[in-house]
């Protein structure tokens, strides 16, 4: 049996490994010019998810009761699947601009339709993350086939679903109904003209 603490440590280690591979991959590409080495290092970023997935499966098959650590592992893998490629792409654009003479990355839109579209794109990434995480949690429940040992996993599915719905309503839907408008330009010309006339 396991209390799952080693999985929590592994989740943290995988997060550190992801950023280490990302930094090493981009560093070798733009600082050293080693594109082939960079490609290999960046290709290692999803490997950490495979390691975590295998460790979670082996832990459950050993007879452990699913707990917070197993749910956290599934959520981490889901987030990596939903946002990992986007994170790598945006980091690559920043490094290319800073060290490779590339164009500046597009800033995050703040207003209007572009902001609304941005919020929907982010939520779709979250939807992918939710789908992957819940699929893994559901597969674990089927694999263990013991309601007493997988109660925590069902709670994680409920929690992730609630979070996805709250995200949907608070950002994409809210920005669609009430799109944020750019601040109005200050119209101080009449005021200045009145002040000039008064001073005369």
Image (cartoon, rainbow, N blue to C red):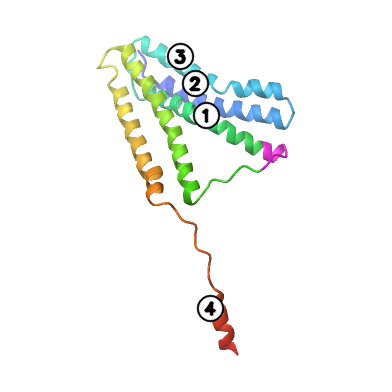
Q: Secondary structure at mark 3?
A: helix
Along the line of sight, the residue nearer the viewer: 23 or 142:
142
Q: Which label belongs to residue 191?
A: 4
Return the x and y of residue 11 as percentages of the image width and height.
Answer: 46, 24
Mark 4 or mark 1, whichever is nearer to me: 4
**Bounds of the magenta span?**
96-103
Residue holding disc 3: 54
Q: Residues within 10 Å of mark 4 (few under 14, many from 20)?
A: few
Q: Secondary structure at mark 1?
A: helix
Q: Are marks 4 and 3 in contact (CB under 8 Å)?
A: no
Q: Are marks 2 and 4 in contact (CB under 8 Å)?
A: no
Q: Are marks 2 and 1 in contact (CB under 8 Å)?
A: yes
Q: Earlier in the sequence, mark 1 or mark 3?
A: 3
Q: Residues within 10 Å of mark 2 (few under 14, many from 20)?
A: many
Residue holding disc 2: 49
Q: Earlier in the sequence, mark 2 or mark 1?
A: 2
Q: CA distance from mark 2 to mark 3?
A: 9 Å
Q: Residues within 10 Å of mark 1 (few under 14, many from 20)?
A: some
Q: Secondary structure at mark 4?
A: helix
Q: Which label belongs to residue 84?
A: 1
Q: CA distance from mark 1 to mark 3?
A: 19 Å
Q: CA distance from mark 2 to mark 1?
A: 10 Å
Q: Earlier in the sequence, mark 4 or mark 1?
A: 1
């Amino acid at each position: 049996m396991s209390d799952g603490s080693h999985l929590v440590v592994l989740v943290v280690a995988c997060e550190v490994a992801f950023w280490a591979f990302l930094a090493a991959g981009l560093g070798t590409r733009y600082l050293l010019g080693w594109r082939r080495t960079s490609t290999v290092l960046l290709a290692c970023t999803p490997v950490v998810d495979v390691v975590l997935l295998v460790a979670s499966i082996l832990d459950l098959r050993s007879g452990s009761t699913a707990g917070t650590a197993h749910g956290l592992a599934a959520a981490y893998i889901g987030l990596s699947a939903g946002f990992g490629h986007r994170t790598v792409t945006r980091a690559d654009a920043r490094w290319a601009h800073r060290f490779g003479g590339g164009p500046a990355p597009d800033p995050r839109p703040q207003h209007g339709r572009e902001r609304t579209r941005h919020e929907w794109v982010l939520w779709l990434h979250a939807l992918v993350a939710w789908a992957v995480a819940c699929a893994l949690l559901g597969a674990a429940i089927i694999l263990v086939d013991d309601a007493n040992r997988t109660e925590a996993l069902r709670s994680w599915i409920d929690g992730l679903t609630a979070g996805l719905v709250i995200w949907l309503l608070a950002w994409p839907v809210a920005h669609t109904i009430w799109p944020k408008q750019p601040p109005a330009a200050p119209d101080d010309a009449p005021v200045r003209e009145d002040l000039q006339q008064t001073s005369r």
